[in-house]
Amino acid sequence: MALNVKILTIFPEIFPGFLGYSLTGRALEKGIWTIDAVNIRDYAFDKHASVDDTPCGGGAGMIMRPDVLGNAIEHNYKGGKIIYMSPKGSPLTQAKAHELSQCENLTVICGRFEGIDERVIEEYGIEEISIGDYILTGGEQAAMIMIDSVVRLLPGVLGNSLSTENESFEKGLLEYPQYTRPIEWKGRKVPEILLSGHHEKIAAWQKEQSLKITKEKRPDLLEKSS
Ligand code: SAH
């Protein structure tokens, strides 16, 4: 079962962009997931293909029109969740990425300007997802980040599925420090324990390091899990 992603955007040419590279790109070639970016302008009603208008009540910027966006949704929706990338949404977390990786169809709306008319969100029961507490110029960047986090969790995307298990956030902790060869570099040595070949001791050290780093860098993660 592939994950089919439909993107509604005024810049379809941005996709698949960086999702066409590396692991996500290979998975796309293998058909583990598909992406189809549709231009919202194709669903406009006037000859200028206008998708936005001034905000009711005044204020700066432009708002994406509900009739045009609604028309785009109704012509392209194939079931499943509809997501609007929005700074007002619930935060994208690893848990959310896992949830979305179970879906067969995702329709993702990328906002531009000052965002979309609120009635669209209500009309179609749209879920709003934010990638962080800052403002981007468009939802395309956010959509690509969200899709990247979801696609790498699909079966067959990462060569070694164990490799996600110990990653940051999977167990509510940040990942332990990682090293490779050379064993000594600029006078800095790889921690002795990692060269011991003693798997249990190594696992215990990694767990301890994970806890220590999480305490130092992201104490909020420990508070959340306790
Ligand atoms: N006026 C809006 C911001 C509009 S930014 C507000 O204050 O809430 C333009 C578009 O970029 C939005 O419609 C949204 O699709 C996208 N965007 C901006 N920041 C984002 C974020 N942190 N997460 C997800 N999408 C974001």
Image (cartoon, rainbow, N blue to C red):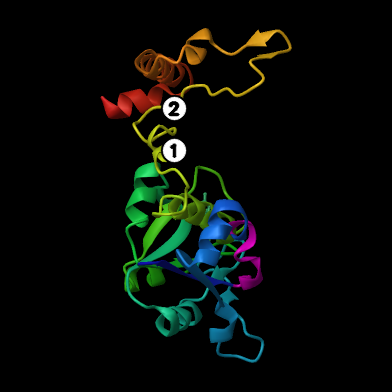
* Image quarter (top left, top right, bottom left or bottom right) of the N terminus: bottom left
Left or right placement of residue 128 versus residue 43 in this view: left
133 or 74, nearer to the observer: 74
* Residue at x-position 44% and y-position 43%: 160
Instruction: Specify the label residue 163 is tagged with.
Output: 1
Instruction: Specify the label residue 174 is tagged with.
Output: 2
* Residue at x-position 58% and y-position 13%: 190
Q: SS class of the residue under badge 1?
A: helix
Q: For the residue marked with disc 2, what is the amino acid?
A: Leu
User: In this rendering, does residue 110 appear at all?
Assistant: no
Front disc: 2 or 1: 1
* Residue at x-position 44% and y-position 16%: 209
Q: Position of residue 109 (x, y in %)?
A: 48, 67
Q: How busy is the neighbourhood of tag 1: few (under 14 within 10 Å), some, or many (20 plus)?
A: few
The residue most toward the front is 197
Q: How busy is the neighbourhood of tag 2: few (under 14 within 10 Å), some, or many (20 plus)?
A: many
Q: Position of residue 167 (x, y in %)?
A: 44, 34
Looking at the magenta stretch, what is its main secondary structure? helix
| 209 is higher (above) or lower (below) than 117 | above
Q: For the residue marked with disc 1, what is the amino acid?
A: Ser
Instruction: Specify the label residue 78 is tagged with.
Output: none
Left or right placement of residue 177 versus residue 120 in this view: right
Q: Position of residue 90 (x, y in %)?
A: 38, 49
Q: CA distance from mark 2 to mark 1?
A: 14 Å
| 48 is higher (above) or lower (below) than 219 | below
* Image quarter (top left, top right, bottom left or bottom right) of the C terminus: top left
Provide the residue span drawn in magenta: 10-19
Magenta span includes 162: no
